[in-house]
Amino acid sequence: MAYRTRMGRTGAALLVAGLLVVAAPPTGAGAATVPRIDLRVLVVDDGGDAVDAVESELRGTGVPYTVVRLGRPDRPVIDAAFLADTVDGRPRAKYQGVVLPNADPFGAGSAEADALAAYEKTFGVRQVDAYTWAHPGVGLDDTSDGGYAGPLDGVDAAVTPAGKAGPFGYLDGPVEFEDNSPSVGESYGYAGRPREGYTSYLDMPVGADGGRASLIGEYAHDGRRELVVTFAYNRHQRQFRLLARGIVEWLTQGVHLGQSRNYFSVHVDDVFAPDSRWDTQLNCTPGDFDCGDGEGAGTTPIRMTAQDALYAAQWQQSAGFTLDMVYNGGAGEAWKAQNGGSDPLTTQLLADRAEYRWVNHTYTHPFLGCVQDTSTVPWQCAKDAAGSTVWMSRAEISAQIRDNHDWAVGRGLTVDRAELVTGEHSGLKTLPQQPADNPNLAGALADNGVKWVASDNSREPEQRALGSALTVPRHPMNVYYNVGTAAEMTDEYNWIYTSRADGGSGVCETNPGSTCLDEPLDAATGYAAYIAPQEARTALGHVIANDPRPHYVHQSNLAEERLLYPVLDKVLGDYRSLFADNTPVVNPRHRDVGSELARRAAWDKALADGKVTAYRVGTTATVEAPSGVVAPVTAPEGTRKQLVLGTSEFGTPYAGRRSAWTSPEALQQAITLRLPA
């Protein structure tokens, strides 16, 4: 038996005093007959993708669960003693829900199957069959009786009225099964027609008569309830990601530890500064140390104009979305000095200052790590006479942070001193040349009150400490900083992702994490037809996976042909066509993402250490967590929070539930939530 939480996430705990208790158990005559249901899920794992996917959703949401691995000879036997006992004279169900790899992983009539069935019936505990076929044993006709068995790639399934009224009420549009490659089968399934006791939640068209058959539904029988899933999937596929929230809500009956949101924020780096341009002849970026003479001859830098800034503000209004402008004030001043002392771009951005959020990106965007020795390619960290690495000093780093903050304040920008993005995430370790953080960085962050400093999620996906600050990993978007036109973007993309035989760099052939294109993209159509939709699909995958990490691009992507907007329009457009109004995109700022990741890390550690106790007794629930740990709780609409005098509405609404990171109120040692009947 193994215990799992979101162990992949790391970070520091936020200190919030108090022991969390959600409601008190009933007292009085007959109270002991009301069973206690622990808020923990049992996962029976056969090693398949379907169980792994459901487990990933539990972990990502923050739901405690216990795993029993079927293939291990030392696994516990699932019997009555394993599933239930008595605590303080009250019957206790140790699990609020059960996830099985299929409808009958133990074999019909086995002692374990019988024990599990009796347990679910006795305590009203629900079961998810992660992947099974359509047959009468799960409440469906065989697929030969008017159903379907076969590939599902590209199929438009639909949430039924019962699904929308039930666990999938947060979905609005069709659930289209992915079909990313015509040469690869991506999903397979069985659609069966419901029998008595079966309520379909997701179905698809079958046959020529306009009939429909079920892919997900609830089968009520013998005093038990099963959620039956009859198609194969993995944790990354969009169809699962869309349905994952509803699976957990159905399994837990809407009351569980953990919470989930759909997050999307976009940082626009280098605002006020120019960005170098890709040279389509040299296949590199002049100005970089490994390109030509390193002087940037032959190309014109890319920088937004006043018209681009005006368009950005107008786009935000029409899209209902706020960008984070990550700015370099000193680089803008240098540009102005080099171009006759006039800068319409800065004038326009400052006029629209209230339209955006602003984040410090250092004054002139220098490299804040080791002093770079560019006499070799790739560059190396410079060494002193004693052979020690030469670092940018604490004073220099501090000045870059301070001067940029002061520049913004002096021009009426609203900035938070605690937020910082260093140029190229420099100062943090940069493999292979700089395997350690600049030892002067943490002190400079403390000098300026920085608590949240950006890191690159592709290098460091986990949050970590830098002195008293914490990192905020950001997803790089595949819209390059050094291109202003679709043709330039496609040219560079082809160079990176095509083989040497096709005229590319061949990097895709030697990098194990990369795949080469079958053939180079067309310069005229490649960006709009292939790159932008692919990047939008990747970003939307992050959004619907409860991942709060920001995405980052550059000001060049808002300039010239404004390459970023088609990506953002597709992400937001696809999202809003899929989700109901009760499940809006959450657009957090830099510090809020850092706080969310830190809270999750503290919660995960408390779960991993076995220091969280949570259970329901009737319409109340109790959660005990270590002092200093804030607990995430999700509950139905109508849940009330007990105050010293009276009650208040608990949490905030999202996706048809209410949820919050919660801690005791003033003068209280515990939090009490009263669940609706």
Image (tube, rainbow, N blue to C red):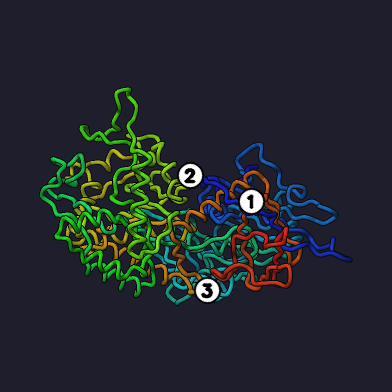
The answer to whether 311 appears left or right of 175 in the picture is left
Q: Which quadrant of the rendered structure holds the N terminus?
A: top right
Location of mark 2 (residue): 464
Q: Amino acid at mark 2?
A: Arg
Determine whether the residue tagged by mark 2 lies in a helix, strand or loop. loop
- Tell whether 584 sits left or right of 228: left
> Label 3: how many residues lie within 10 Å, few (<14), some (14-19) or many (20+)?
many
Q: Nearer the viewer, mark 2 or mark 3?
A: 2
Q: Earlier in the sequence, mark 3 or mark 1?
A: 3
**Type of amino acid at the residue the image marks with label 1:** Gly
Q: Are marks 1 and 2 in contact (CB under 8 Å)?
A: no
- Number of residues whose C-alpha sits closer than 10 Å to that of mark 1, classed few (under 14), some (14–19) or many (20 or more): some
Residue 396, quarter of picture: top left
**Residue 56 location in percent, x, y?**
53, 52
Q: Earlier in the sequence, mark 2 or mark 3?
A: 3
- The amino acid beneath tag 3 is Thr
> Tag on residue 160?
3
Q: Rounded to the nearest whole Å, what is the CA distance between mark 1 and mark 2?
A: 19 Å
Quarter of the picture holding the C terminus:
bottom right
Q: Residue at (41%, 72%) from the top-left corner?
A: 577
From the viewer's side, name the closer residue of 179 and 55: 55
Q: Judging from the image, what secondary structure is the residue with disc 3 in?
A: loop
Q: Which residue is mark 1?
A: 628
Q: Position of residue 254 (x, y in %)?
A: 63, 65
Which structural element holds mark 1? loop
**Mark 2 Cα-neighbour bin, 10 Å: few <14, some 14–19, many ≥20:** some
Question: For the point 36% across and 70% down, which residue is it?
Answer: 355
State whether residue 122 appears in this view. yes
